[in-house]
Every structure is written in structure tokens, then in C-alpha cells.
Amino acid sequence: MTLPLPTPDPRARRRLEIGLALLDDGQPAEAADAIRAAIEIDPGDVEIHYALGQALEAADGDAAAAYRMALDLDPEDRMGAAVRLALIGAAPVPAQLPEAHVRTLFDQYAPRFDTALVEALRYRGPELLRQAVDRAAPEGPLDILDLGCGTGLAGIAFADRRRRLDGIDLSPGMILQAMARNLYDRLEPGEIVAALADWPERYDLALAADVAVYIGDLVPLFAATRRVLRPGGLFALTLEAQDGAGDEGWRLGDHHRYQHSAAYLRDVAAKADFAVVEIESAWTRTENKVPLPGWVAVLRAA
């Protein structure tokens, strides 16, 4: 159960806003001073300690103590302090992003998600998945499970191929947006691997559009997905690509998104009893208007 954070002190929040404005203006040292003043007023505010870490990180200072304090104040880690600690080399890289962090991020993002992702970031993951699935299974209706369904963008892309369409997402806010589309037969909030452990349905197709980017170690996801697919069923997913992604075959990028190598993807697929239908290089979104290298993969359950 996620516990509510304490009510912030408005005086501290005013100083925090000044600090964040200075940080956005490229003055991280001055930002850190303003944020420290906010901490003196309200030392129990998680967001202020996290912001101090951001300012010190930008100023090439020692940000670890600030991030650790944020994590101590909120062990569920809604801000993602553990991720920042990993990225500055002060903690091990987590196998996936903290659930509370992802849930909080997308609950806040849900009302403007489609506009921000499709228009600003030129997101085209569902479109690419539809093309790949049509190549692998060109005809007939399908029972489809949309993993990390978000607001239902993949549901739209596959609407005319669905016999049944179910979805799971960690964010209740995103689930509410997907419900409004009236495309899904069942929508469940929850963490994917845990939800699939006792999921009763079986499917011809599982989709994971922009899901693997929040998970480093894909072994649990692939095993759970294989369990809910019928023999011969397809698992279609998008990933961000990184050549030489490290000894594990994956790494955590600066934008809190994981990148995977094609070799790692093939290895995990084989371990989960999937045959590779295709792994194609493609970009699914942009970052700072630059296309991000990625993969579109289709796997078939043995």
C-alpha cells in the first residue's frame, strides 16, 4: 500500500520553485542554495531533497547524500532517487524502475500523455507493432493482451484485429484514460509480472509497447508473458537499443529508460521458450527531436 506523503510547507515550496527556476536557467549552484533554504524550513519534504540532488548533480557536486535522504524519507521511492543514485555511480543499477516511481510518473502524466507522446515525441510504437504483427500473422481476429496498456494507443492500432482485448497497467490514471476508449474487454491496474501470475485467460498475441524501457532484466517479464500465450502465440514489443549495452546486455540511460542489446533479447527469448520471428532496428520516439535507436521484436511461443 502506498502511503501519502506529508503535506508540504508552502513557504518551503516557494523557495523550491525559485531553486527549480534557477536550475532551469542554467544556474545549478544558485539553485542549490535556494533549495537548501527550503530544506531548512521543511526538512521532511522528499521533493525538496530530490531537487537538491538534481541541482548538485548539475553543478558537478556531491548529490548522493541528497538522493539518499529522499529515499530515506520515501522508501517506496516515488521520485526515483534510487535511479539517480545508480546513474551517478553511488548505488547498484536496479533491475527495473521502482514501481511507485513509475506509477506516480504516469498518474501525473495520464491526462496529457497522448499529446505529449505522439505530438511532441513523435511516438509510433503501436504503428510499428501493428506492421510487424501483420507480417507474422496477416489474417484473422486475435485474442490480445496489452501489457502496460497506458491510455490505449496500442488498443487503437489493433482495434480491427481484436476478438478480445485486455489490458494491464501499473498506473490507475492511465487505466482510466484507456477505459474511456471503450475498446477493452478487461482492464486491470497492477504490476505486469505479479498480475500475470494468476491471470486466467490465454491469448494469441501479447503486446508490450514502450514497456521494456522501464525494465532492465527482462527474464521475469518474458516468462510471465509466455505463460499466458497459447502455443504459437506472438509476443510483440518495442525496446530502446544500445550496442554493447554492458555485460548484462542492458543498461540504464540518463532519462530513466533502459536500453537492451539484440543479443540479450535473443538470449532471454530462448530461455523463455520463444522463437524469434523478427528483431528489426527502428526508432519509436524522439528525444530532443532526435530519433532514438530501438528494436521492434516479434517472438513466437513454442
Image: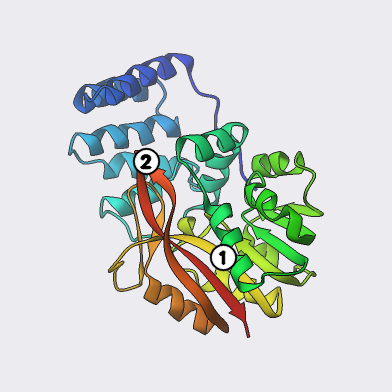
Quadrant in which residue 208 is drawn: bottom right
Residue 67 placement, left or right of 170? left
Q: Which mark is residue 160?
A: none
How crowded pointer 1 is (Cα within 10 Å; few <14, some 14-19, many 20+) is rated as many
Against 136, is 89 above or below? above
Q: Which residue was labeled with disc 1?
A: 132
SS of the residue under disc 1? helix
Dot 2 lies on which element? helix
Q: Amino acid at mark 1?
A: Ala
Visual colour scheme: rainbow
Label 2 neighbour load within 10 Å: few <14, some 14-19, many 20+ = some
Name the front one of labels 2 and 1: 1
x and y percent of residue 206 in the render? Answer: 65, 66
Q: Nearer the viewer, residue 135 or 90?
A: 135
Say which residue label 2 marks.
69
| Residue 83, percent from left and from top | 38, 50
6 horizontally vs 55: left or right: right
Residue at 24% x, 39% y is 57
**223 to 15, vertically: above or below:** below
The residue depicted at 50 percent of the width and 83 percent of the height is 270
